[in-house]
Amino acid sequence: MINLDLYKVLKTSDGDLPLDIKMDIKEGEFITIEGHSGAGKTTILKLIAGLIKPDKGIITVDKKEWLNTEKKTFLPPQKRNVGFVFQEYSLFPNMTIYENIAFADRGGQNKNHVDEVIEIMELENLKDRNPQTLSGGQKQRAALARAIVRKPDILLLDEPLSALDIEMRLKLQDYILKVHRLLNLTTILVSHDISEIFKMSDKVVRLNKGRIINEGTAQNVYQKNYISGKFRFTGEVVKIEKDSVVSIVSVLIGNNIIKVIATQEEGDELKPGNRVMIVSKAFNPLIIKL
Amino acid sequence: MSEFQPIILSLELAAITTLLLFILAVPLAYWLAEKDFRLKPVVSALISMPLVLPPTVLGFYLLVAFSPNNFFGGTIENIFNVRLVFSFEGLIIASIIYSLPFMVNPVQAGFENLSPSLKEASYTLGKSKFQTFTKVLLPNIKPSLLTGIVLSFAHTIGEFGIVLMIGGNIPGKTRVASLAIYDEVEALNYHSANLYALVLFVITFLILLTVYVFNRKYLKSGRL
């Protein structure tokens, strides 16, 4: 069980923004924090990791106090045993992929475990390469591998997939879910991709201007979007197949792929990765580009 | 051999100065890149002063400070039994101060250009501040370190005004190549002047060439 009660005044371009949150996270849970940029999402992850200090607050992990500003306890990031994956990968350019991952190994005594992680993340072919020569998806896979070497109590993912294209993103989501389940991690993801949130999270926390405005399962949190009069979904185009007279568009909605028939002209306008809305008028669903 | 003595002295001075400067300036540059405090502009301005100040101004003040009759020079002489005026040791200290911005500025810029998340990533992987500094930060600013080392070395070799003020042009002790060239020209000894000048020219060209070749290799391989 992880309990957070944090307060910190953030300096933003629009003036001071008080970040004030309380969260309880169960062990093994997959939580997503969603909100506009500047809502304080990344700050929460950094506070948990100990990379920044709050003005006031308590963090307890399995009844152990990582932080308590009243008692002036502060466990430095080195002792917190968290895995952190950054949006910009942050692999060390002076090391190979293998060296990057082995760097996380405590005292280098656990070579087998490093090899095991490389195997789980399917990085054997890339382990002698330098980070600069890898694609975005490969880099993020390596960064994820590095973050789990220390068997962290909490895995913190700061918009790790936002710089990747849709296909890569879907693949990386599967890797993240795989390690989350395999290592029984407690994972906190920052994301504003609704389909990603539906696919990944047990629980979603919506943040606005430093405060939690809604939390619960993705279904509950986003439900009101779905029952507003018309029957409609938003999703992402995954695939477009041309048939003789029509195009078949596969759209990812939540974690379901839905196939929709479109005219060829409509199909030509769409590309994988486009955000679309699917609306049903009477009984024929129409597809509208967003 | 004594003909080459000024050149050897110049190289010795430049090598020792660069080494000491490296040890001193890298932590200083990191401190300046990391911390923000009210007096930081003052510290930065002081470090960069030698860039714009005539060497004679700095030389004059250092000469006054180093004098055994004054507090600083007197204390050094009492404790270490070293006289800083008109001595090689004095030249080293003067050169360190004079070349400080050439080492601090590129290294500081190198640290500032590193993404903060590299340091943060290392911390969350359980590495201490010192390990992070030596294994992650320093190796990733190699081009900046190289630039700092080369600029300091070349700048020390090229010093004239300040070595004249502090060193006093004593053959075999403080008469470095740049001074020797001036002396030979004054004595209309163009052959010797040309020899010193040519050697300095070739040495500095080779040093700079090496740097550019290395930097190009780094850029090409993408690995630091």
Image: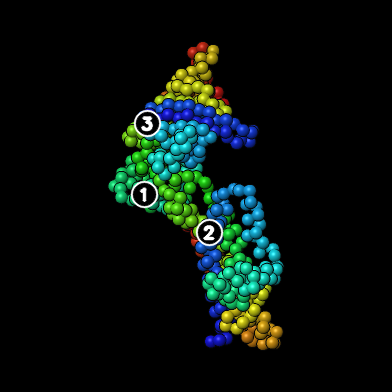
Q: What amino acid type is highlighted by mark number 3?
A: Lys
Tag nearer the camera, 3 or 1:
3
Q: Residue at 58% of width from left, 59% of height from top?
A: B104
Q: Residue furthest left?
A: A112
- Picture quadrant of residue A139: top left
Between the C-alphas of marks 3 and 1, the distance is: 30 Å
Residue B167 image position (x, y, % from top left): 62, 77
Residue B213 image position (x, y, % from top left): 53, 65
Q: Residue at 61% of width from left, 68% of height from top?
A: B72
Residue A202 image position (x, y, % from top left): 40, 25
Residue B84 image position (x, y, % from top left): 59, 74
Q: Residue at 36% of width from left, 49% of height from top?
A: A102
Mark 1: few/some/many CA within 10 Å (<14, 14-19, 20+): many
Q: Element under label 3? A: loop
**Which chain is home to disc 3?**
A
Q: Which residue is mark 2?
A: B26
In-front residue for pair A99/A170: A99
Q: Residue at 51% of width from left, 63% of height from top?
A: B23
Query: Relative to A253, is A10 on the left or the right?
Result: right
Q: Which residue is mark 3?
A: A63
Q: Are marks 2 and 3 in contact (CB under 8 Å)?
A: no
Are the numbered discs 3 and 1 placed on the same chain, yes or no?
yes
Q: Which residue is mark 1?
A: A102
**Which chain is home to disc 2?**
B
In-front residue for pair B196/B174: B174
In the picture, which quadrant includes the C terminus of chain A? top right
Q: Element under label 2? A: helix
